[in-house]
Amino acid sequence: MKKISLLLIIIAFTACQKKESTTKHEVVKDSHSFSNPAEAVAKHLDLDIKVDFNTQTISGKASWQIENISKGNEIIFDENTLNITKVTLGDEEKETKFELGKEVEFHGKPLHITIEPNTTKVNIYYYTTKESIALQWLKPEQTADKKKPFVFSQGESIWSRTWIPCQDSPGIRFTYNAKVTVPKDLMAVMSAVNPQEKNDTGIYTFKQEKAIPSYLMAIAVGDIEFKPIDNRTGVYAEHTVIDKAKWEFGELGKMVNAAEKLFGPYQWGRYDVIVLPPSFPYGGMENPNLTFLTPTVLAGDRSLTSLLAHELGHSWSGNLVTNATWDDIWLNEGFTTYVEHRIGEEVFGVKEAKMQDVLSRKTLKNNLDEIGNDSPDSRLKVETKGRNPDDCLSEIPYEKGYAFLQTIEAVVGRKKFDEFLTNYFKAHAFQSITTEYFVAYFNKNLINGDKTLANKINLDDWVYKPGIPSNIITPVSEDFNSIDNIQKTWRKTGVKGLSQKIKSTNEKQHFIDYLPKDLTTEEITAIDKEFNFINGGNFVVRRQWFIKTIQNQYKDAYPAIEEFLTSYSRTGSLLPLYKEMIKTPEGKAWAKQIYAKAKAGYHATTVQAVEPLLK
Ligand code: BES
Ligand code: ZN
């Protein structure tokens, strides 16, 4: 009997898996969400919240329109660190039973709500707590203007449930309206159609009419202003930053046009960006209609705006077509890295693009050296079950994903691949898909039974195996070749005048990355004198230079490194420095000292990432 039921389970399971790979609307089991979308699924959110800086809480009501597919009597939401005070059903707000399940580390708890077969609306009353990871509450001194407090959210990957009770899976999409009450001297913006000026009621309303996954729910509240760049793009920032930001991102409209030319219409209406205070933990976050950005991109010379191309690219890969689970993140970041490079080529030209390509490969190589060529995390399709998806994130989905798509492009030709991508985005707009579904779609629409083509691409190895298949392309940049030549001679000829030959951020990064390991103090001093990297470099150049100076224990850079590590919370840029520091006992002690000072200003996700290193 036992054997038979086991067999039945296996058959049902494989049948399910097969279906999953060919049907697009299928609800896929996401191990990071407790929700039960196959039985009851949330479709639309009406959010009515108050943002209170005195208590540092968001409180209010999340009214979910639901579809009770199975006509059963339960819907399950995700929540983490919230206080749920009451749940009611329908417009008549009839109180109903709810129960929190067992807490699981990182995941929070399932919120079981009793519903009726014909329930279409569930109203959840709640407030956030100090532990809500998604929200960072900033004191005035942590902002650019230093006058008013600020709060922003970061939902990706599984943190939206710490500020809104939701079915927190990238495979579930919903539309939303929101009414947000904030202190009268502040303004609220969200991942939606946004206000362009402050009003005197402190009440702001939002509409997101496109169905989005929960990790793209976002809010920022502060003393912010808006300035247009053109009639479709613009920038939000604090007063002291707004003009700088408007200038820095002056090419935003051009980028949107370039992306549309390549991959089809921009489907979201406006595209604006907001520059957040320095504790924003990422370079950028592609919240729909309003990309959230680190202020570290404000270099003053537009030298770091390729990051915008990346976040904008997500308006196709990621926000239109989304990874159904966190195991499929490469569908999101790998495709976006490809789109980013293509936008970059259009806007900044082929020479820049070639340099970016070479840097990409170097990043991939470094990352593989770090995690190991045989690490399961070096597969494109990863297994993140039971882990914090943020911890599983490496350069692999980005750079191996990019290298894979470049390989396909090289094999089938750019024209055909562009057509494929444009159709792929269009066919799956506002849907979430798995890797298996993508593979099936790819085989049907691009391979089409052509075995030679399939062999040339070798998708299985790229997607399901660790390491890098041998058909990877090695990009070449002539500009970098000249720098490689300089690298061979400068130790004899000296560094004077080199800053006239090595000028752009990409060139400087390449030069720094390939400096010899055994640099003498005199050499480092001479290089820094020639280029003024420590004080004059942009954020990326300084980061790369600091890695070198830590490796070579160049003490003159230490105060600047300390300032760098305590001023920003851009995790991806801080980690390489910390990782380099902890390689020696003195370095580790120094890192701990700096971290102790910096921690209070760090974002919760930065703390999660840095702290384990220093144990
Ligand atoms: N969506 C990501 C940020 C992210 C990924 C947040 C996973 C949480 C979990 C964003 O698009 C991104 O990739 N940002 C990069 C910059 C980009 C230019 C590579 C970053 O912040 O480093
Ligand atoms: Zn991204």
Image: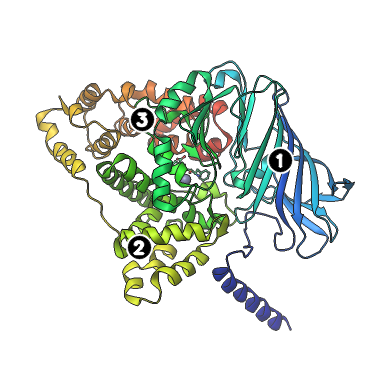
SS at circle 2 = helix
- The amino acid pointed to by label 2 is Lys
In the rendered image of this protein, does residue 406 appear above or below residue 46? below
Say how the picture is coloured: rainbow
- The amino acid pointed to by label 1 is Thr
Residue farthest top in this picture: 147
- Relative to the observer, which residue lies in front, 43 or 152? 43
Residue farthest front in this picture: 231
Q: Which residue is denoted by mark 1 in the rendering?
A: 81
Q: Which numbered mark, 2 or 3, is in the foreground of this view?
A: 2
- Relative to the observer, which residue lies in front, 489 or 549? 489
CA separation in Å, label 2 and label 1? 48 Å
Q: Earlier in the sequence, mark 1 or mark 3?
A: 1
Q: Does the image show residue 163?
A: yes
Q: Residues within 10 Å of mark 1 (few under 14, many from 20)?
A: some
Q: Does the image show residue 131?
A: no
Q: Could you say where residue 498 lies in the image, as x and y percent from the top left?
A: 17, 28
Q: Could you say where residue 176 lies in the image, as x and y percent from the top left?
A: 68, 44
- Relative to the observer, which residue lies in front, 515 or 332? 332
Q: Quadrant of residue 465?
A: bottom left
- The amino acid pointed to by label 3 is Arg
CA separation in Å, label 1 and label 3? 40 Å
Q: Residues within 10 Å of mark 2 (few under 14, many from 20)?
A: some
SS at circle 3 = loop
Q: Which residue is denoted by mark 3 in the rendering?
A: 302
The answer to whether 547 appears left or right of 323 in the picture is left
Q: Which residue is denoted by mark 2 in the rendering?
A: 416
Residue drawn at 45 percent across, 46 percent down? 313
Q: Which numbered mark, 1 or 3, is in the foreground of this view?
A: 3
Residue drawn at 63 percent across, 25 percent down? 187
User: Within 8 Å of ligand 1, the CB of disc 1?
Assistant: no
CA separation in Å, label 2 and label 3? 33 Å
